[in-house]
Image (tube, rainbow, N blue to C red):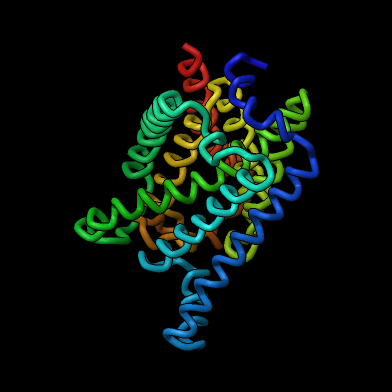
């Protein structure tokens, strides 16, 4: 364990009992679901049950800017739930999951730069040699860009605070083995990305990709001593997939362009997984060497 990581998990050590972590996850889940349910209940009172059903159905597809922004906003209750769990069960602030502010901001910026550069090269190559279609007009896309960025900051921030912040910190404060504090949250993170209804036969590949990303994010967090690098990498990854080039049939509501093929037309293969994992692994390798300097 590096000195940076030891300092990062120090706030979790006074109350690192497993029962507290389990109850903390329960509190987070209850607050998350209760706040979302309350939001839809208010919508039902204001606009009626049929309008709420239509909204839920459209959010499941998320093919419009409004619905996808709403989906991203639903991650805000997760952050609120984590803040309650940290305060009630661990007597610490939500900010302790992030680490030192200046370091987290520096690491976030470095991760966005590294992942953005490598993914950007891949995007240019795809646009040159692949086929895509315009999804949103450029003017509308630019107008929505600040909201898109904010929504992705909330979504990726909520997931990183939960998996690399709360879970990794709490488990590392209790167990010395990375097999527990790095692998276990990463596997859970991957399994929660299993979505056969939307992804079809490629759903297992999404689980593998998310698990690998989780392991990389856990490593970056341990090496840097802050959540910044993992959050920046997650933000950059999702920005390219959600805002720039989305696969048709996935979350396309905020994308500038979409592929000319649908997710249903993809044939699962190791090559498909490699095209997603190789740029990610390259970006992680560059970042982990840069971040320790």
Q: Residue at x 64, y 54 (%)?
A: 28
Residue closer to the observer: 90 or 251: 90
Residue closer to the observer: 201 or 129: 201
> Percent from the top left, x then y, of residue 86?
62, 44
> Percent from the top left, x then y, of residue 68?
42, 63
Q: Residue at x 23, y 57 (%)?
A: 143
Residue closer to the observer: 140 or 162: 162
Q: Is residue 101 above or below residue 135?
A: above
Q: Residue at x 48, y 20 (%)?
A: 286
In the image, taking residue 87 as reference, residue 182 lies left or right, namely right
Q: Residue furthest top?
A: 293
In the image, taking residue 115 as reference, residue 169 lies left or right, namely right
Image quadrant where residue 256 sits: bottom left
Q: Is residue 13 above or below residue 60?
A: above
Q: Residue furthest left?
A: 139
Task: Please state, as top left, top right, bottom left or bottom right, where the N terminus lies in the image.
Answer: top right
> Percent from the top left, x then y, of residue 116?
38, 34
Residue closer to the observer: 95 or 265: 95
Numbered label tally = 0
- Asked if one can make out residue 105 in the rendered structure from this viewpoint, the answer is yes
> Percent from the top left, x then y, of residue 58?
47, 74
Q: Is residue 94 above or below residue 54?
A: above
Image quadrant where residue 132 sits: bottom left
Q: Residue at x 61, y 49 (%)?
A: 206
- Asked if one can make out residue 118 in the rendered structure from this viewpoint, the answer is no
């Amino acid at each position: 364990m590096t000195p940076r990581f030891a300092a990062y998990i120090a706030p979790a050590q006074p109350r690192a009992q497993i029962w507290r972590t389990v109850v903390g996850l329960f509190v987070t889940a209850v607050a998350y679901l209760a706040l979302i349910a309350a939001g839809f209940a208010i919508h039902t009172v204001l606009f009626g049950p049929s309008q709420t059903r239509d909204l839920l159905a459209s959010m499941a597809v998320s093919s419009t800017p409004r619905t996808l922004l709403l989906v991203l906003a639903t991650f805000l209750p997760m952050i609120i739930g984590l803040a309650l769990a940290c305060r009630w069960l661990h007597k610490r602030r939500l900010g302790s999951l992030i680490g030192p502010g200046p370091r987290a901001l520096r690491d976030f910026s470095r991760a966005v730069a590294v992942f953005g550069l490598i993914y950007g090269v891949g995007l240019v190559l795809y646009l040159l040699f692949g086929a895509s279609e315009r999804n949103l007009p450029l003017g509308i896309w630019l107008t929505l860009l600040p909201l898109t960025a904010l929504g992705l900051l909330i979504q990726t921030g909520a997931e990183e605070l939960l998996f690399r912040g709360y879970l990794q910190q709490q488990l590392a404060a209790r167990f010395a083995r990375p097999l527990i504090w790095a692998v276990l949250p990463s596997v859970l993170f991957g399994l929660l990305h299993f979505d056969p209804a939307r992804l079809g036969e490629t759903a297992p590949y999404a689980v593998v990709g998310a698990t690998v990303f989780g392991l990389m994010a856990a490593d970056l967090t341990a090496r840097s001593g802050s959540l910044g690098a993992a959050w920046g990498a997650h933000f950059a990854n999702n920005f390219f997939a959600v805002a720039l080039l989305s696969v048709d049939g996935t979350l396309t509501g905020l994308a500038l362009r979409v592929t000319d093929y649908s997710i249903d037309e993809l044939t699962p293969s190791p090559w498909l997984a490699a095209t997603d994992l190789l740029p990610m692994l390259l970006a992680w390798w560059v970042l982990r060497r840069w971040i320790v300097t």
